[in-house]
Image (cartoon, rainbow, N blue to C red):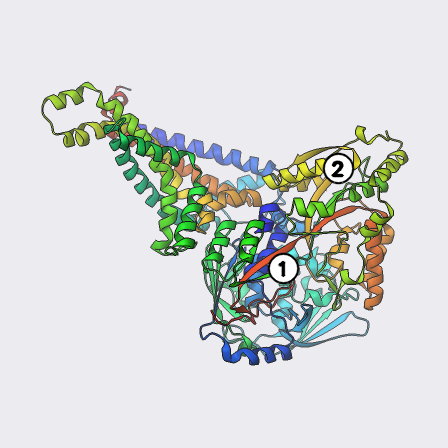
Amino acid sequence: MTRYIIKRVGYMLLTLFIIITITFFLMHSIPGDPLAHMAKNLPEQIKENYYKKYGLDQPVMVQYVKFLKNLITEGDLGQSLRYPGRSVTDTILEHSKVSGRLGAQAIIIGITIGIILGVVAALFRNKWPDYLIMFIAILGVTVPIFIIASILQYSFSVKFKILPTTGWGKVKHTILPTIALSFGSIATYARYMRSNVLEVINQDYILTAQAKGVSPFNIVIKHILRNAILPVITIIGPEIAGIFTGSFVIERIFGIPGLGSYYITSINDRDYTMIIGTTVFYAALFVVAQLITDILYGIVDPRIRVSEKDE
Amino acid sequence: MKAKKYLSLFITLILVVTWLAGCGGQNGQKDGQANQEVAKVETGIDSEQYFNGYLVAEPSTLDPSKGADNYSNTVLNNVLEPLTRLEEDGSLNNVLTPAGAESWNISDDGTVWTFHLRDNKWSDGEPVTAHDYEYGIKRSLDPATGSPYAYLLMPIKNASDVNSGKLPVDELGVKAIDDKTLEIKLEYPTPYFGELTYQRVMMPQRKDIVEKYGDTYGTEPNTIVYNGPFILNEWIHNSELKFTKNPNYWDTSNVKLESISMKIIAEENAIYNSLSNGSIDSAGVGSPEWIERFSAEENLKHIETIEPSTYYLFFNTNDKVFKNANIRKAFSLAIDRQELSNVIFHGINAPAYGWVPPSISLGNDEYRSMVKEPLLLLAEENPDSKKLLIKGLEELGMDTDPKNLTVKISLGGTDQWFRTYGEYLQQMYNRNLGVNITIEQLEWPIFNSNVMKGEFQIGYMGWGAEYNDPASMLSLLKSDSNAIATGWKNEKYDKLIDLAAAEMDEQKRLEYYKEAEHILLYEESVVAPSVYPKSNTFRYKYINGLGVTPFGTSGWKYGYTQGR
């Protein structure tokens, strides 16, 4: 196992390095510069001074080496170009906390409700609870999140005036965005869970358990859930990586200071340091989440552990 | 917000709207009038004075030299005290009013401006001195600062050489004669120099604070000191900014608002929902349905203003087709501006027949009220734009059948609005001129870089004037300016702009501008203005004293609520 993890970490670092390199050269090769957000052409001298101040006058290769050096030796991602004076690392840490909190709330609600609904739907297969749950699930998957968010905002903050429209800081600010964010995952997990349970339910060992007189509740908890939940773990990993990066749409609608908006705006603004910073952050989270998923998988499913040993 | 939806790329314009909408306000009376008004309402105003506004995006930085967005401008106008403020008189004309400076003199030849400062204090108790203003201006022009807006200060003596590093910063024509007197020498008499004295690049800065915080100066509320009407207390990045009244401010008795909150809300519907439920007090509204809806609300007042901006098509005069002036004229006249503003802009924007938008003044009068829009005359004389096109094609020795002419229009936006706009242009030109149009939709930075390289035929852009003088629009087309890359060079035009830039007599200056605009649109049609954007602000009736003119800079200073 240890050797396996070391090998995986090595691959992870290599992946990150490749992503950084490709992103760095790609973003410098698209036309435009960090002054583009002004939407006007400035006099040459002004541009020159600006480029010089932020080191953009140097060849891309030199900038790349400098960036890598700062990243490796000091963990420093540089200074934002759109928000002069702000450190990219601090910005990412500050805003990913907000996204992380919201995302965690949404994912916990999403998984819990989703799994319960999925199991219920499978157990009541082709009866009305199944139809109702699958109807909700289809809505959750097909209705775009911004529509759900807008309806929630309009109903609860304009019509009934019980929750704030936008903002951040108190628990009440998180309620609507959490519901909106979890809606999609409730639907996804419910559908996943339903089909997994249906698969498991027809297995011989369930029949055996029933024949041995195990109570229906214990069958669900011990036999069905444990086996049916396995494939769900595969989709949880990447989703956990996603919670720290936030949702651009939800953050915009509810005025939440998460990290999501930086992914989009930094590219439009050609805020090079922020582009590479957010990319590194997301890529790192993603590969780490993948690694954890694989390790978790090994713990939950003994067959994988066995095959590792064989290797 | 309207501008966001349509022209998410023309940031400047969005900024203007925002600044109008959430916050920008200004109550511009001259001192005497303001006092009278305040005295009148003193008895009836609410005991709790606060204002809730919004910004569409996070301010970049409060470092006056570095940022280039109007969100931070909005904040700076309220927390720092520039030499002057552009306030607003009873008939909504902008008036340059003493602020940090109590008075100023201009030398007879117009090249030396001497500002006499009033007593004012920084939020840490230190007195505000002329050295702070001197340092602020010098820092903006210092090449090491890399200030994007430094180019506004080029009329100052040696500014260009200092900014390019040819001369040391000390050689700049700005000097604090004593603690209360600031002398600014100019390269040439600049009649609109007064309009630069309220810009961020001329705001006072404290050397000790700048040096203490280095690059983080102005990035957090506690890394900058304040000397304006308000103090920024809390800044939750990308979420909310909270201000309170500055007790050290020289004119604090005229400041009524005790606290202000500016939420950052980017999403259009969230803004309208916030206005609907009263969590913000004022909002700029761009969508026609919401304008209709809010107009019916009796608690809201509707304020409509024309922004100091022009949206326009522009031609590449080095192109094999558009080097011909008659063809350019034909393509300009073929735009049905009335229909365009009704169909594409839902009647919100006004058709544009001139280059200088309304709401820009020359002296104390609106330029547009004194000079007839040149395209009206051109249209009168040429009722059939197709004839001009054929004439132009003949002059070029090309096939004179418009059906065989294909022209590409490049748009700097990829969203649905630009798609609709492109299709509309296609149909309109096909109908009015019989030519074939292809539309190229590009992301703004790519569009911009193609234009700079001259790889386009017709482009579309918007420009918001930076200061309240026709020069801010007309100087963009000078041959040494790269603002709008038409490739056009006209000696006579350049000369007129230069003459106007150094002419202190307003009547003469008006004549120069009038002639220049005539050359630009009537004789040469280098650009084809299409609409002047308007902004619609809805504000609860209890909000008073926040002004409405787009250029005004007195911010929230005179705001108060009555009957909230």
Looking at the picture, which amino acid does disc 1 mark? Answer: Glu
Looking at the picture, which amino acid does disc 2 mark? Answer: Tyr
Count of marks, rendered view: 2
Q: Nearer the viewer, residue B462 or A89?
A: B462
**Residue at position x 23%, y 25% in the image:** A302
Mark 1 or mark 2, earlier in chain: 1
View extreme (left): residue: A213
Q: Which mark is residue B429?
A: 2
Instruction: Answer whether residue A2 is visible to the viewer in this image.
Output: no
**Residue A290 x %, y %:** 36, 32
How crowded is the residue under tag 1: few (<14 C-alpha within 10 Å), some, or many (20+)? Answer: some
Q: Chain of mark 1?
A: B
Q: CA distance from mark 1 to mark 2?
A: 31 Å
**Residue B127 x %, y %:** 56, 76
Q: Nearer the viewer, residue A201 or A156?
A: A156
**Residue at position x 60%, y 55% in the image:** B15
**Residue B19 x %, y %:** 58, 59
How crowded is the residue under tag 2: few (<14 C-alpha within 10 Å), some, or many (20+)? Answer: some
Q: Height in image: A279 above or below B11? A: above
Is mark 1 in CB contact (under 8 Å) with mark 2?
Answer: no
- Give SS at disc 1: strand
Image position of B147 (left or right of B364)? left
- Give SS at disc 2: helix
Q: Nearer the viewer, residue B31 or B359?
A: B359
> Mark 1 highlights which residue?
B304
The answer to which image quadrant residue B95 occupies is bottom right
Q: Chain of mark 2?
A: B
1 and 2 marks on the same chain: yes
